[in-house]
Amino acid sequence: MVATIEASAPMPSEESSRGSRFIGALQKLKPAITFPLYEKQELKNEILLKLAKMDFNYSQNVYKKELHDLFRWKNELDFMSKLPYVRDRLVEGYFWSMAFHFQPQRSYARIAVAKSMLMLTIMDDTYDNYATLEEADLFTEILERFILNLYEDYEVEAAKQGKLFAVPFAKEAVKQIAIAYNRHTQWFMGGQMPTYEKYIVNTVVTSCIYVFLTVGIPGIQSASQEAIEWLMSEPNKALIASTRVCRHADDIGSDDRESKDGNMPTAVDCYAKEYGVSKEKTVDKFNELFEEAWKDFNTEWSTEISTTSKDMMEQLLNYARAAEVNYKNGRDGYTNPQNYLAAQIAAIFVDPIAI
């Protein structure tokens, strides 16, 4: 019913490709835009409008309950007191997970992605910021505890839902991302700056996409072994394009944070050094590559989508959309949500729509 109202409501005046992508980025953010527009129409259906608002508020209550459970889980594991340097971004991680799986019935998948997002933030921030043996040992201990906890539950749920085929893929995804993060650390902290091509290939894994798309499978009724095998096929051009939408935007938005006041080389430095261009020209190039990645994904969407790949393709699309919301225009919304995501988070998780 919400979709019916969205189809009936006129679109906002800014109809650029980037603007329309942003509006489509989070399915549950659409009603906050379309309801006021639909209410102004003379021929609106009052009953349909009321039911659609009730549907939105019901979904919001589901999300609030899941967030409550996630906070309790995080507090029990007590990550933040042991690793105070880690960005505490549980709500923002859940915001990403909701972009992947907005449907109320996909609760398991949403929660699994949010937990993984926190785990990967811990990995990323540890590799980026600390390298002493003592801190590395503490990190390893906490990480192993988390993975054991997560994948014990994962295997139980996978067996219950007839999705045991996904377990080895999910475990391998976590293993590979740890290897990729370590490779990145050796390059940049060890002073062994790679070629930009080597860097960008490694980011297909550090994009976290394999973890995100495998960890939620037990909660997706339509997921099949054929679909996950399609996802893992190489080269998967749709997956690569989706990750590069995120990577090119993220590398611009996170450059200041990752450079540590100019003391640590970044992806921008890597490209600028290899091609002998300024930082400003590198940023311009990354913006160009960002748009090219969207074009590549749209091409794959129109030519490669099938019954087998449809659900995975939709998640790849939503990953790219969420990345644009978080990192568009050189911003780092995940690191600085109070500046860039507060309104969107409040609209989805806090403010009900008046009926």
Image (cartoon, rainbow, N blue to C red):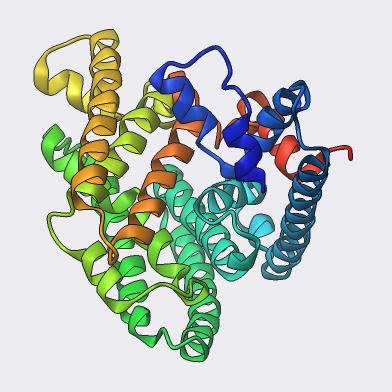
Image coordinates of residue 198 in percent, x first then y, are 13, 42
Residue 7 higher or lower than 314, as above or below:
above
Left or right: 274 with respect to 133? left
> Of all residues shown, which one is farthest toward the front?
43
Residue at the (25%, 23%) spot, across then down: 269
Q: Nearer the viewer, residue 97 or 309?
A: 309
Outermost residue toward the right?
355
x and y, in percent, of residue 31 in the image = 68, 36
The reply to whether residue 133 is in sight is yes
- The quarter of the displayed image where residue 115 is located: bottom right
Of residue 45 and residue 307, the one placed in the foreground of this image is 45
Whether residue 271 sits left or right of residue 118 in the image: it is: left
**Residue drawn at the location 32% of the way across and 50% of the way down:** 206
Image point (38%, 60%), residue name: 311
Question: In the picture, residue 260 is in which quadrant?
Answer: top left
Which image quadrant: the C terminus? Answer: top right
Query: Looking at the picture, how far across and down is residue 237, in whole percent?
Result: 18, 48
Query: Where residue 14 appears, x then y in whole percent?
Result: 51, 13
Residue 226, above or below 299: below
- Residue shown at 15%/20% (left/top)? 273
Residue 261 shows in this picture: no
**Image-quadrant location for residue 234:** bottom left
Instruction: Please give the count of numbered marks on the rendered protein.
Output: 0
